[in-house]
Image (spheres, rainbow, N blue to C red):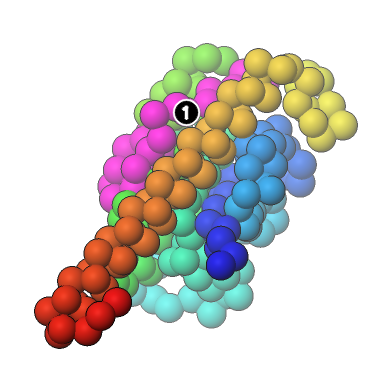
Amino acid sequence: MPTVKPLIVGIGGTPREQSSTELALRQACEAIGDQAEIRIFAGRELLLPLYQPGVASRDPGAAALVSALMHCDGLIIASPAYHGTISGLIKNALDYAEELSGEARPYLDGVPIGLITCAAGWQAAGQTLATLRTIAHALRGWPTPYGATIRTVPGLFAGGACSDPAVAADLGRVGEQVLAFAQSQASALAGLASVQRAATLTSTGTAP
């Protein structure tokens, strides 16, 4: 029986295409690309209408983001550090998760969330990572134990690939922890379904 790949969604970057933050996100996703289905929202895809609670958005980009969040098995968020916190662009994208409040799986309940921050200095990167962890908890998600704080320097992502092996390893670790958690959850749910099915067959006297 073929194994269904988990859906891992990536959100990150700036309005500038191929920003350092977007490239960091893509590097983390590429590390698990052969074992997961990847859907990335980055760059201009994040130029969404300002989220308004209770007002249904007709923007197709917003609808695609909400659908991806609804069905994802894991999420990776990458934000630049702007004045010690996440960017408004990333915050607005995450605000759309409010549309999932009434779903069977409200918000991002139980979803593993990997976090990446990029900044010119370590202090801003650390503060921004702490903010992302708080948001992940508020959305009922599980921030992975490891979060990557990246100090962006000229040439770090020259040609689109990370030139620093240590940074590349950090980004890969974020993706791998999200994938491992998603796979573990899928396995646990499959096992639970099997036990429940066996219990049902036993109670009805039906041989498995």
Q: Indicate yes or no whether the magenta region holds residue 132.
A: yes
What residue sits right under mark 1 in the picture?
147
The image position of residue 40, as x and y in percent, is 64, 54
| Amino acid at circle 1 | Gly
Image quarter of residue 193: bottom left
Q: Identify the residue at image location x=66%, y=38%.
A: 31
Q: Secondary structure at mark 1?
A: loop
In this view, the residue in front, 170 or 22, is 170
For the magenta stretch, what is the residue range? 131-152
The C terminus is located in which quarter?
bottom left
Left or right: 46 with respect to 44? left
Left or right: 159 with respect to 127? right
Q: Is residue 41 visible?
A: no
Q: Indicate yes or no whether the magenta region holds residue 177.
A: no
Q: Identify the residue at image location x=61%, y=31%.
A: 172
In this view, the residue in front, 40 or 92, is 40
Q: Identify the residue at image location x=79%, y=31%.
A: 161
